[in-house]
Image: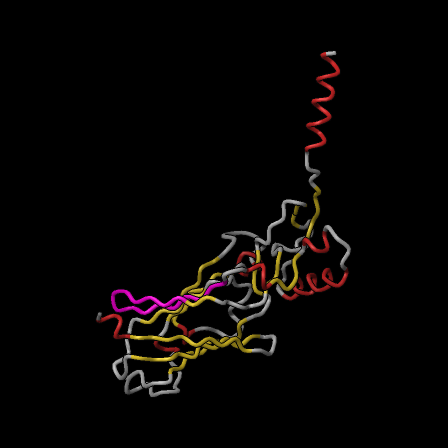
Amino acid sequence: MKRCIIIITLLLLLAGCEVRKVGFRAGYISCYMYFNPDEINVTYESGTVSIELSSSNPNRDIYVDSHSFVFGDNPLLAERYYALCEKFGDIKSDGFVCYDPSYSIYPFACFEIINSVSIISNNDWDTEHPAGSLLNDMFTITYYTHYPYIINGYTGEHITEVTKPLSELQDDEMKLIQYFIHLSCTIPSTAAQHHTLTVSFDLDTDRTATYYVELDFAATEA
């Protein structure tokens, strides 16, 4: 009788165990996303205005994720994924292990390369920057990318933080970035207190992501 109870207990335990499947994907990036930040946060601190762009729900902007074809039958998504792996040189001979049902979109990155970023205002910034002129030399940009890790043969930090003057940003530099982008300016406007900035990201997919940011330098004096 005791033996029967032990056997039944073991069977119940096995029945409750979730089967974990193991698969492999070619690249380090698990999920490719559209570039689509939908949250803008503006702060003023110690004479610096900071603009942060981020995504409230990355799952909403998935272009292709490896899980869809590693553990499913979707040749179209497999072709789409491998094309992006080739585009960014993200192909490892023995692949990267992934599991089902323990699925995560991480590591994820934007598949759209940012060719350039521009900032203009509807008002004069100062005597050298009238309304409608480029303000890139007034701002610093910070972004995060997986690209150095991949091109260095999957060595070093998995994600790299890059901070530089926006005017020094190189064409096609922003590859495999995360959503969070930080723009900051330490030289407040001397010509007007209220500005509507047009922040534009030109992408390699022949589209431009444009954001309108309201600045009020009077807030720093309150």
Report which quarter residue 165 is drawn in.
bottom left
Q: Quadrant of the C terminus?
A: bottom left
Residue 135 horizontal/vertical position (percent): 37, 80
Residue 120 as seen in the image, left or right of residue 19: left
Nearest the viewer among 56 and 32 is 56
Report which quarter residue 44 is drawn in.
bottom left
Furthest residue to the left? 221
> Is residue 51 a member of the stretch shown in magenta?
yes
Q: Residue at x 45, y 73 (%)?
A: 169
Residue 162 horizontal/vertical position (percent): 44, 63
> Is residue 69 a member of the stretch shown in magenta?
no
Residue 89 as seen in the image, left or right of residue 171: right
Q: Which residues are magenta?
A: 41-55
- The colour scheme is secondary structure
Q: Residue at x 68, y 37 (%)?
A: 18
Nearest the viewer among 142 and 73 is 73
Q: Residue at x 37, y 75 (%)?
A: 214
Q: Residue at x 45, y 78 (%)?
A: 118
Residue 144 as seen in the image, left or right of residue 74: left
Residue 138 horizontal/vertical position (percent): 34, 76
Main SS of the magenta part reads strand
Q: Quadrant of the N terminus?
A: top right
Residue 108 horizontal/vertical position (percent): 57, 57
